Image: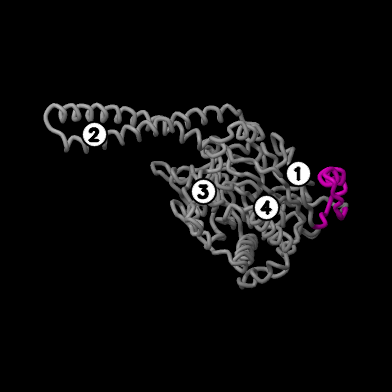
Amino acid sequence: MLWSILKLLRENPEELKKHVQKRFINPNIVDEAYKIDLEWRRLLTEIQKLRHRHNVISREISLTTGDERNKKIEEARSLLKELNELEGKLKEIEEKREKLLLSLPNVVHESVPIGPDDSYNIPVKFWGKPKVFIEYVNSFLDQTEKYGFKVDYEVIDWKPVGHADMLEKVLGLGDTVKASEVAGSRFYYLFNDIVFLDLALLMYAIDKLTSKGYTLVIPPYMLRYNVLIGVIDLETFKDSIYKIEGEDLYLIATAEHSLAALHKDEEIPEEKLPLKYVGISPCFRKEAGAGSRDLKGIFRVHQFHKIEQFVFAKPEESWDIMEELISNAEELFRGLELPYRVVNIASGDLGLPAAKKYDLEVWMPAQGVYREMVSCSNTTDWQSYRLNIKLVRRRGMVKEYVHTLNSTAIASTRTITAILENMQNRDGTITIPRVLKKYFEVFDKAPRDYIHPVKKA
């Protein structure tokens, strides 16, 4: 079975154009891909005919003698020369064709809201009772009632301390100033109780997901170029990924990248699907496009720890599994008692691989906005085509590409910022979420109920 995008390109290019336009991308790319694929197939057919003719003549040479034999030898030489020329042309076209095919975005799912950017994202669910500073009430209502939701909230008359100041100035458990001196902006030092909090969040997510049958994985933290282009749109994001100088290796931005490649060039029997994994890794990001956004604190940084869900699925099951993945993430954040909303991401904000994407955003009381904590995507067969991962059906041994799905479970530093804003008390302490307490108890020196400011000498 063909890759779904290639199938659509050949059978209904106008329909594929509509999907490209939904992403606000120039649809001419479809025309270019269609023409070059047509030329590639024409050349391939011509080469196959010439090879067949050459094989026939080669057999006939051994059965003839004299002038007839010499004629056939000359014809064989002529065919071989023509074959070599066409194969050289095919290789050249093949490279252009592959580059064009790899630049085609995924087909947009029918439930995705159409719009050029994140202002067209649509909230589909709210949970929790946010604490809303009195001056942010109108803004909060604009982020909830505007979309037809009536969300219960608690009005507070004191403005919570922002996560950056809470971490460094109130608690004294982080230092981004010294980190920027030794490593540059968007790096940090974390100390003592915040490190325990980071570890507790990771253990909490791992515990929950492994209990659901997900296989725990520590993946490679670096990938080769030919693998990474199978996972992401590297042309668009090459300025966001760290490359190892002098090596064909890139640092991963998420465990999704390595987990997607786990079954590269494999054929998976359908009875083994779905394959569900939970990866733990550091993540490395240049954040080149972030500009001056979130320069303070640890919300948007170059390195952090993350627990990632990843699934290889049968095509007919992938949309149900997407709901399972976002549900898992919701369960984790409900356990942490962090008010959140789930957002259906607009077509122009999806990125090339995703057919559909949800974000889970947590209410940040000091900022008066919901901020992204989780991203959950169904990339259908966009990655599996590039990585050559197929499933084998029992009936007739039919082969087709698997669907791949991914979702954040917990990104530790971002989740810490949400806890610092939502769980802070007026005395400067942070209440430790109940679900995390048993993971703190693993460490003798870890706090039990509250994270306290460091006493200054």
The residue labelled by disc 4 is: 168
Identify the image quadrant of residue 59: top left
| Residue at image mark 3 | 384
Magenta span includes 146 = yes
* 10 Å crowding of disc 4: few (<14), some (14-19), many (20+): some
CA distance for labels 1 and 2: 66 Å
Image side of residue 52 versus residue 250, left or right: left
**Which residue is tagged 1?**
122
Choose top left, top right, bottom left or bottom right for residue 172. Answer: bottom right
Q: Secondary structure at mark 2?
A: helix
Left or right? Give the position of 302 relative to 145.
left
| Residue 11 appears in the figure | yes
Q: Give the residues drawn in magenta, as a range.
A: 128-155
Callout 1 crowding tier (Cα within 10 Å): few <14, some 14–19, many ≥20: some
Residue at 56% over, 50% down: 303
Please tell me whether mark 3 or mark 2 is closer to you in this view. 2
Mark 1 / mark 2, whichever is N-terminal: 2
Front residue (pair 173, 68):
68
